[in-house]
Image (spheres, rainbow, N blue to C red):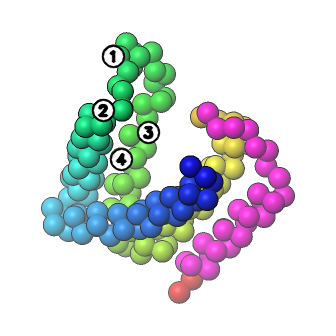
Amino acid sequence: MTNGLYFVLALLAGVGVSVQLGVNSQLRQSVAHPVLSALISFAVGTLVLTLYVFGTARQSVPPLETFRHIEWWKWTGGLLGAIYVTTAILAAPRIGAANFVSLVVAGQLLAALLFDHFGYVGFLQHSINWYRVGGAALIVVGVYLIQRN
């Protein structure tokens, strides 16, 4: 894939996050329980991914022994996802989609700058420079402007 296609996929993933906010918030209203709605969301996602992994012949699953040697912290992605989805279900309906997403993006960017700078969790090391700080500052200003009514 070309970088342009990856950029488009990332943009579409962002659109999907905003749609997911609304869908999960509506699900919460239907079941009247934020954590149950997060569980349903993850169960549907797990089902779809299970069908894909085991339904495609070209996808190979590693032997069980491989899973025994994975460091503990590499298993926390699902936990972090559960925290994010539950937080979104609780907060987005109260503060609005634009406010929620802008704050999430600001938090993601600030963390990403640190992860890139230090090469944490497997990312290639990219030092913080004035361009990156300037871009982050513009996003923080954007978050401030979005928060203002």
Distance between the alpha carbons at the discs numbered 3 and 2? 26 Å
Q: Residue furthest bottom?
A: 149
Q: Amino acid at mark 2?
A: Ala
Distance between the alpha carbons at the discs numbered 3 and 4? 9 Å
Dot 3 or dot 4, earlier in sequence: 3
Marks 1, 3: nearer the viewer: 1
How many other residues sit within 10 Å of disc 1, few (<14), some (14-19) or many (≥20)? few
Residue 77, label in figure: 3
Q: Position of residue 136 (x, y in %)?
A: 71, 62
In the drawing, does residue 22 fall left or right of residue 115? left
Which element is circle 2 on? loop
Marks 3, 2: nearer the viewer: 2
Q: Residue at x 63, y 54 (%)?
A: 3
Provide the residue span drawn in magenta: 122-147
Residue 137, label in figure: none
Dot 3 or dot 2, earlier in sequence: 2
Q: In the rendered image, which residue does mark 1 sit on?
A: 64
